[in-house]
Image (cartoon, rainbow, N blue to C red):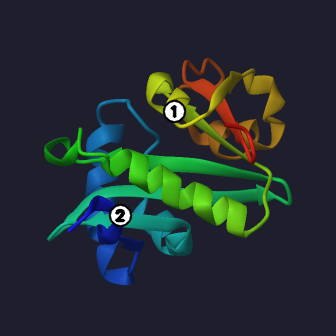
């Protein structure tokens, strides 16, 4: 079965597996961890790659009418290099377009990955709403070393 066919909306029964996968990468300082409570609160934001277990996860968070965030992208090591991350991001971008949102951004340590998906670098200061919400809870704030990147609908 193709990677895309194994991507689906997250379900209640996925929360502990999602938490575990995100925690694994958060413990390495590669992404911002999420509490179990936060995952339940935002479960509808998440999609998963289910290959006999949750092997990948990504969330789409709507910020306002013309901006969404791709966040919490994580792919288990054994599933990396198979197009899982790309398929998860594309699924989120498909939703961005379906909702008629014009831009999606991410904060990442994997800029080269997102550049392949037509994201371009921007200054963190262009994301004031983001800085004053989740970023305040990040241990790296205000010295964030993640790269801010944006995708604009229609750009190729």
Q: Is residue 117 above or below residue 8?
A: above
Q: Quadrant of residue 147?
A: top right
Q: Is residue 130 visible?
A: yes
- Depth check: 124 or 29 in front? 124
Q: Indicate the position of residue 124 as horizontal and vertical percent values.
A: 73, 25
Q: Residue at x 74, y 48 (%)?
A: 153
Dots 1, 2 in contact, CB < 8 A: no
Q: Is residue 7 above or below residue 27?
A: below
Q: Residue at x 54, y 74 (%)?
A: 44
> Which residue is denoted by mark 1 in the rendering?
114
Residue lying farthest front? 156
- Depth check: 38 or 30 in front? 30
Q: Residues within 10 Å of mark 1 (few under 14, many from 20)?
A: many
Which label's residue is closer to the chain start, 1 or 2? 2
Q: Is residue 130 above or below residue 48?
A: above
Label 2: element kind: helix
Q: Residues within 10 Å of mark 2 (few under 14, many from 20)?
A: some
Viewed as shown, does residue 39 lie left or right of 93? left
Q: Indicate the position of residue 92 as horizontal and vertical percent values.
A: 55, 58
> Which residue is denoted by mark 2 in the rendering?
4
Q: Quadrant of the N terminus?
A: bottom left
Viewed as shown, does residue 131 lie left or right of 3? right
């Amino acid at each position: 079965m193709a990677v895309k066919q194994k991507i689906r909306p997250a379900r209640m029964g996925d929360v502990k597996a999602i938490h575990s996968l995100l925690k694994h990468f958060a413990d390495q300082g590669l992404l911002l961890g999420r509490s179990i409570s936060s995952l339940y609160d935002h479960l509808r934001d998440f999609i998963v790659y289910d290959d006999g277990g949750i092997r990948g996860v990504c969330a789409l968070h709507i910020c306002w009418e013309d901006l969404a965030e791709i966040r919490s992208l994580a792919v288990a090591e054994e599933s990396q290099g198979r197009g899982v991350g790309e398929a998860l991001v594309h699924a989120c971008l498909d939703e961005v377009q379906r909702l008629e949102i014009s831009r999606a951004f991410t904060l990442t340590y994997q800029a080269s990955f997102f550049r392949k998906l037509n994201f371009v670098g921007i200054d963190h200061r262009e994301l004031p709403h983001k800085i004053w919400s989740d970023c305040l809870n990040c241990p790296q704030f205000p010295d964030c070393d993640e790269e801010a990147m944006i995708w604009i609908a229609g750009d190729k």
